[in-house]
Amino acid sequence: MSLNERLTQIQPNAIRAFDAQISDVADILKLTLGEPDFNVPTHIKQAAIDSILADDSHYAPAAGTQALREAAVHFLADRYNLQYDADSQVIVTLGATEGIYDTITAVVNPGDRVLIPAPNFPLYDPTVVLAGGVPTYVDTSATDFLLTPDQLQGAIDTYGDQLVAVVLNYPSNPTGATYTSEQLSALADVLRGTDITVIADEIYSELVYDGQHTSIAQYLPNQTLVLNGVSKSHAMTGYRIGFVVGPTKLISAVGLIHQFAVTSASNPAMAGAAEALGTEAGRQDTLAMKAEYAARRDYLVKALRELGFAIPQPAGAFYVFAQIPDELEQDDVAFSLALAQEGKVAVIPGSAFGIGGAGYIRLSYAASLADLQTAVARIAAFITD
């Protein structure tokens, strides 16, 4: 029986694998997955219901419904001053996850390198490998978990034409770090004039707590593929709706991958997403959720710092990336397993996110404040026992 040999080079998703490993622990309190605890707003659910009741049950255009593509264009223009054509520069995907697969597959040939600032969400790497490419990492743990222009220029100088793309995920999963407009402009200055494609995973763009999110596409519109969606901004993870925007030439290639992979997304889910992205009510939904997340962040960061964890201030997303205190077990996998089995709190070991993650744990604050308070009490008892 023949299998794709590249599958031997990748492992199952480390986040999901660890979560499954500790899920059977009795009375476990899980802060593992990036799963919003909010329900989908009623008006969004009603839009999906209306689609079903209207017998909207036939194939949609492969790129997504016209209504959703126009809503996505409106969303990007309204929030981030980005301008795209709904007919030729937008592809609706099954979440940002499919967007990652489509964009990397569209631009990577065997032997090509893709630059990934690390620690990183562990989905980019295996997708690059499956495309025949070479994941190439930059350790950002000493630069506030952000890629610097010097690091980027060094990679370009080292790898030359082999380097075809750079992944920028911001706000970041796992660290919550994000870039200022000035930092993005400086990175764009390095990339401008090269043939390098920027894959900008901006799925957490609506969850920026200090200032406003800026897309690098403002500075490099002809080299950037932007990934976004409604999973995190509107608590719609199960609807599986994301989208990719970019210059027509790149989007045409992404669209081919998308057509052959999934054909099109679900009509009721797209109707709900169009309501989320295209209405003022959808905007207010996000603002309300963001205020709750900010309060949770502030509580969790302060509480964990008081317990001795060193934590870079998360500027966005809903994760805390906490460095384990020196006097405790420094093997983050061993620490996380013991915390789950003895302390009854589930987190993700930092090493699941690759280079620069060892010695850290990631905690999701997409959980109620009451659950976070219980988790902190349990962690305090565990580390002082």
Image (spheres, rainbow, N blue to C red):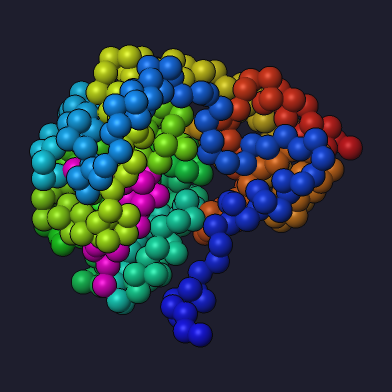
Does residue 358 appear left or right of residue 331 in this picture? left
Tell me if I can see residue 197 in this picture: no
Tell me if I can see residue 62 in this picture: yes
* Segment tinted magenta in the rendering: 90-109
Q: Residue at x 11, y 55 (%)?
A: 249
Q: Residue at x 35, y 30 (%)?
A: 52
Residue 118: where, in percent of width, then height? 46, 54
Up/down of 136 relative to 283, above or below: below
Q: Main secondary structure of the magenta part?
A: helix
Q: Could you tell me which quadrant the C terminus lies in?
A: top right
Residue 133 sits in quarter: bottom left
Up/down of 117 relative to 23, above or below: below
Does residue 7 appear left or right of residue 215 in this picture? right
Does residue 158 appear left or right of residue 26 in this picture? left
Q: Is residue 96 magenta?
A: yes
Q: Residue at x 30, y 38 (%)?
A: 57
